[in-house]
Structure formats: structure tokens, C-alpha cells
Amino acid sequence: MNTENTKAQMRKGILEFCILSLLNQREMYVSDLIEELKKGKLDVVEGTLYPLLTRLKNAEFLSYRWEESTGGPPRKYYEVTENGKKFLDELQITWNELTTSVNQITKNY
């Protein structure tokens, strides 16, 4: 079994939660999101991020606004909607329950 594949799948599973958490702190442009995710050791490329942002927007968990850029095309800034905040609250509860369970199960490892 490939360890790297398993680790990648684990990261992908929490990426949505991390993105919503970051955007709940402040609105961000895609490159801001990538930078923040990298700080947290989650290396994500634009090709992974854009489809996820589109899904979250279509689910009405995110909205965006366009802002003119001084050095190129307009930029799309994302923020969490009220529905997104409710969803994020649910994810936080699930994350807390999951980490407690996993820590309990793996504590003697």
C-alpha cells in the first residue's frame, strides 16, 4: 500500500473544512488561500482549489466579489456566507468528535 496516497486522501478529506475556516477569518483571493494552506503544511495547487471553491459557492457556502487589480485581470475574493458559517459550525463539531475518537483509539500506539 502506498503511504503517500493514503496521506493525500486524508488531507483532501479535510481541505473543505480548512478552506471554510480560513475564509471565515477574512475574505481571500485564491493565492492568499494557497499561501495560508501551505503555512499549515497543506500544499494545494490552483487546479485542486478552483473546483472546490466552485462547489462551495454552488452550495451557497461561499460568495465572491470582483476587485480590480493594479497589475493584471480583476481578482475574485471569496468569503463565507451565513449558510457557510452554519455548515462550518457543523463541520467543527464533527471534527472535534472525530479527533477525540481517533485520539482515544490511537493513544496507545
Image (spheres, rainbow, N blue to C red):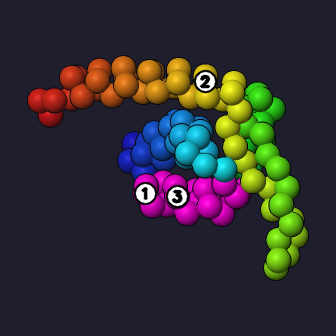
Question: Measured from the top left, where is residue 88 in percent x and y?
Answer: 56, 28
Residue under label 3, please give it: 36
Q: Nearer the viewer, mark 2 or mark 1?
A: 2
Question: Measured from the top left, where is residue 82 in percent x and y?
Answer: 69, 27
User: In this picture, which residue range is highlighted in magenta?
Assistant: 28-48
Disc 3, disc 2: CB below 8 Å? no
Dot 1 falls on a residue whose secondary structure is loop
Magenta region includes residue 16 = no
Q: Which residue is painted at 61% across and 28% down in the image?
A: 85
Q: Which residue is painted at 86% across and 66% down in the image?
A: 68
Disc 2, disc 1: CB below 8 Å? no
Residue under label 2, please give it: 87
Please tell me how crowded label 1 is: few (under 14), some (14-19), or many (20+) other residues with Cα within 10 Å.
few
Q: Nearer the viewer, residue 31 or 71?
A: 71
In the rendered structure, which amino acid carries the disc numbered 1? Lys
In the rendered structure, which amino acid carries the disc numbered 2? Phe
Q: Which residue is painted at 69% across and 43% down in the image?
A: 79
Q: Seen from this angle, which residue lies furthest bottom? A: 71
In the rendered structure, which amino acid carries the disc numbered 3? Glu
Quarter of the rendering containing residue 30? bottom right
| Visible residue check, residue 88 | yes
Asked if residue 42 is positioned above or below residue 95 in the image, the reply reads below
Pick whichever of labels 3 and 2 is earlier in the sequence: 3
Dot 3 falls on a residue whose secondary structure is helix
| Visible residue check, residue 19 | no
- Measure how far apart labels 2 and 1 are at the Cα level: 24 Å
Q: Nearer the viewer, mark 3 or mark 1?
A: 3
Residue under label 1, please give it: 41
Number of numbered discs on residues: 3
